[in-house]
Image (cartoon, rainbow, N blue to C red):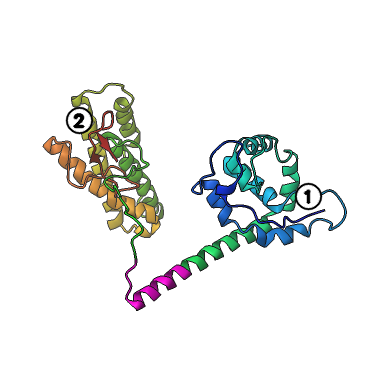
Amino acid sequence: MYRKEEQPLPPPEKFELPFEGKLSPNNRWVIMAELIPWDDFEEEYAKLFSAEKGASAKLFRMALGTLIIKEKLGTSDRETIEQIRENPYLQYFIGLNCYQQEPPLESSMLVHFRKRIDGELINKINKKIVKREIDKSDKEVKKKDCLQEKGEKIKNKGKLILDATCAPADIKYPTDLGILNQARIETERIIDNLYKPLRVKLRKKPRTSRKIARKEYLKVAKKRKVSYQERRKAIGKQLKYLKKNLGNIEDLIQAGASQENLSKRQKNCLETIKKVYEQQQSMWENKTQSVPQRIVSLTQPHIRPIVRGKAGKPIEF
């Protein structure tokens, strides 16, 4: 049997607590409770129960609210009930008028809630929430238009302070040797793709020395401490291998290979690799550690290093 609560729930500041204080209206659970149209779907939920027979069922807000808490916190059924028992904000979220120390329901009830509130009903609720927010924003736009027509100024609601100096990028910590090795591997894959349609015309595939180049890279990359001379020598070798691969790519294109055999990612990557080679060759020849618009990632060439001066991380990307 399902019995709907006739009295509306009090606002969060009137939620009864056993100790002095009030619930904050800015709490995430209070804000979320205001967004969800509980009453709009209670009638549909009540149809699942008999109007006269059986014990009184838990209210729709308690059922849906408990499931939302479980998914939001990522807890088990038992832990969800414990969280509700300990937290007055969660008790307000599921529709209680005052804080109670005893759990409002058993953890086994969540099994029945999941059967009754299916994906179709959740989709309806989501659509309703989105529609309400769209209508709300439309009303605000119309209100602003009316104020502008009347010649009234729109009042500012506060100040927005932004720090846009640097946003952390999700890339591997770049090194000159590492990015050259990655560029060499990508050019080898590009050569493989360009050579496939020319197997009959060109009997011999262009040599890339990939095994030797990899050994030379690992010889230095696996060392815990690398001297300046060792690193410079390794970078010089990788530059030679990369130059050789770029030359082979140009030869294959002149021999009739089409760049249509390359994916869009490979085409973009090839252009980036050419810029990387120019930058690294310039730094190697001039014995410098910096170059304008230095590329530190082949997959995200727009990322740039920035000096922050922090302890432990003087440079961020």
Name the residue nearer the viewer: 305 or 310. 310
* Label at residue 57: 1
Task: Estimate how packed mark 2 is, as few (under 14), some (14 to 19) or many (20 or more) residues with alpha carbons within 10 Å.
Answer: some
Q: In this rendering, is residue 120 above or below 72?
A: below
On the image, the x and y values in percent for residue 77 come to 68, 38
Q: Specify the farthest residue to the bottom.
A: 149
Task: Estimate how packed mark 1 is, as few (under 14), some (14 to 19) or many (20 or more) residues with alpha carbons within 10 Å.
Answer: some
Which quadrant holds residue 175?
top left
Q: In this rendering, is residue 216 above or below 41?
A: above
Which quadrant holds residue 131?
bottom right
Residue drawn at the location 24% of the way across and 41% of the way down: 306
On the image, the x and y values in percent for residue 181 come to 31, 37
Q: Is residue 148 highlighted in magenta?
A: yes
Total marks shown come to: 2
Which quarter of the rendered picture does the C terminus lie within? top left
Which numbered disc flags the more N-terminal residue, 2 or 1? Answer: 1
Name the residue nearer the viewer: 113 or 184. 113
Question: Which structural element holds mark 1?
Answer: loop
* Residue type indicated by callout 1: Ala
Question: Which structural element holds mark 2?
Answer: helix
Contact between labelled residues 1 and 2, with CB atoms less than 8 Å apart: no
Q: Is residue 183 highlighted in magenta?
A: no
Magenta span: predominant SS is: helix
* Label at residue 140: none
* Label at residue 232: 2
Name the residue nearer the viewer: 50 or 125. 50
Q: Which residues are magenta?
A: 139-154
Q: In this rendering, is residue 7 above or below 76?
A: below
Name the residue nearer the viewer: 6 or 122. 6
